[in-house]
Amino acid sequence: MPFDHKLYQSIIDEFTVSSDELKKIAANFRQDLRIGLRDSSQSDSRMLKSYVGLPTGAERGEYLALDFGGTNVRVLKIQLRGSGRFEVLKRVGRPLIVPGEYDHIGANSSAEEMFDFIAELVDEALDGDHEKQYLLGHTFSFPSMQTNLYNARLITWTKEFATPGVEGKIVNDLLSQALERRGVKNVDPVATINDTVAVLLSAAYQRGSTYIGSIYATGHNTCYLEPYNDSDDEPMIINLECGRFSKLTPNRFDKLLDEKSEKPGEQRLEKMVSGRYMGELFSMAVAELLGESEKSFNFTSIDMSNIIMDESISRENVKSVVKDRTNVELETKDCERLQTVASKIVERSARLVTSTFVGIIWQLAGDEDIKRQHIAIDGSVYEKMPLTKENINIALKELLGDDAKLIDTVLDNGGSGLGAAIAAAMSQD
Ligand code: GLC
């Protein structure tokens, strides 16, 4: 049975964000920042201080970098050479969950197991060297409250992590204790930063004119360098945790997804835009179109990317992805419709993310002209999802008009690791 055309059209409409809406969202986002700078309890974004500004590019030395923010944890040994140069000397990584084998992120895991697992990985990166002293920078990509560069305390898990015993704790204390249990005495965790902050540090280390750093991947979040123009405070990077932004118009799929999630009511923007959730939104739309709303198909954002990219006449790839996930054989016409649904979900995601960037650009400019600048972004959605970059550029033009030519987005691949090393170096200033 081909898809019901009315239903299909209504789904497309639900994922469409008009120019006017986009402008409203950007303006609301900026307003939220302004309010948040005065009192973060009044804003959607958490506006967390990172206790670090931008690097000079001259930072040097050999550091350990722990990148902990998704299911894959990585530890790198990085040599900073100054003048924006660096070398990765060693890289190890392991997933925190292998279904059927072990799981360090579910509700049945424990903080101790999780950090013992990470300490083992740190040890692996040392290659048996228990003598040379290392400072470790930790990119911990969850909302954390800090009062200095070291003491990030996890406020709440996001991205469906549920390990008990970490919320409310200073994560580097948990790491230090695990390193001690393992007998690793030559590693000193000195700095914790969010992954958005890491991306900004990494981009600013390598090139100038970058004040906004963003992650557009499993999760989504952005930070920026607040200049504190109206006060004597030193410029400092603020981790917005804007995945929480909620002055948006969720459609019925967004609402359902939120209800079924680990933390209903939280991370509303993130649940509309990030890779972790786009596949779920698409799955729900497909289930409706197939007349099987009660079923949950597990399309991922990678499936969506494969679906969108299929340009073959008979849409063979779409057919096979859909067959794998749903056991249904689609006609070519319906495959094309599913491509449009997937494209619309991606388009909406890129438009919403861009409206938040523009809110920040307006905030940075204040009453002055907008400065020429790069926005540094890392993450699989930005890097690999078709249509993302195009839609970011279209939305920048819609929102900024001619000024859009002053702004470009740049991929900062691997910034999470490099940024952690830079933060470790900056902790010594
Ligand atoms: C989630 C986290 C945030 C992180 C983002 C990207 O939104 O709360 O801290 O930056 O994911 O990894």
Image (spheres, rainbow, N blue to C red):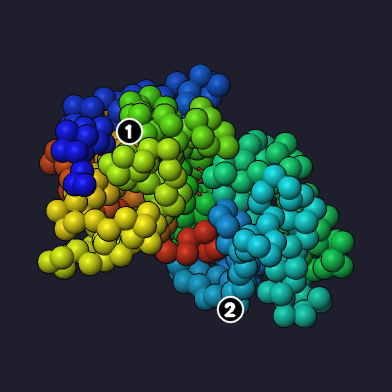
Q: Is residue 313 left or right of residue 415?
A: left
Using a 10 Å C-alpha cutoff, classify the residue at mark 1 as few (fewer than 14 neighbours), some (14 to 19) or many (20 or more).
many
Q: Which x, y percent locates residue 315?
A: 19, 63
What residue is shown at x 68% (from left), y 57% (from top)? 103
Q: Secondary structure at mark 2?
A: strand
Residue 100: where, in percent of width, then height?
66, 62
- In-front residue for pair 5/392: 5
Q: Residue at x 43, y 31 (%)?
A: 256
Callout 1 amino acid:
Gly
**How far from the left and from the top, in percent, is residue 385?**
31, 57
Per the image, the residue denoted by label 2 is 89
Quadrant of the image occupied by residue 98: bottom right
Q: 406 above or below 136?
A: above
Task: In the rendered view, tell whether residue 332 sits above or below residue 41.
Answer: below
| Above or below: residue 248 compared with residue 212 | above
What residue did someone put label 1 on? 359
Q: Nearer the viewer, residue 275 or 106?
A: 106
Screen quadrant of the C terminus: bottom right
Asked whether the viewer can see residue 290, the reply is: yes
Disc sitting over residue 7 in the figure: none
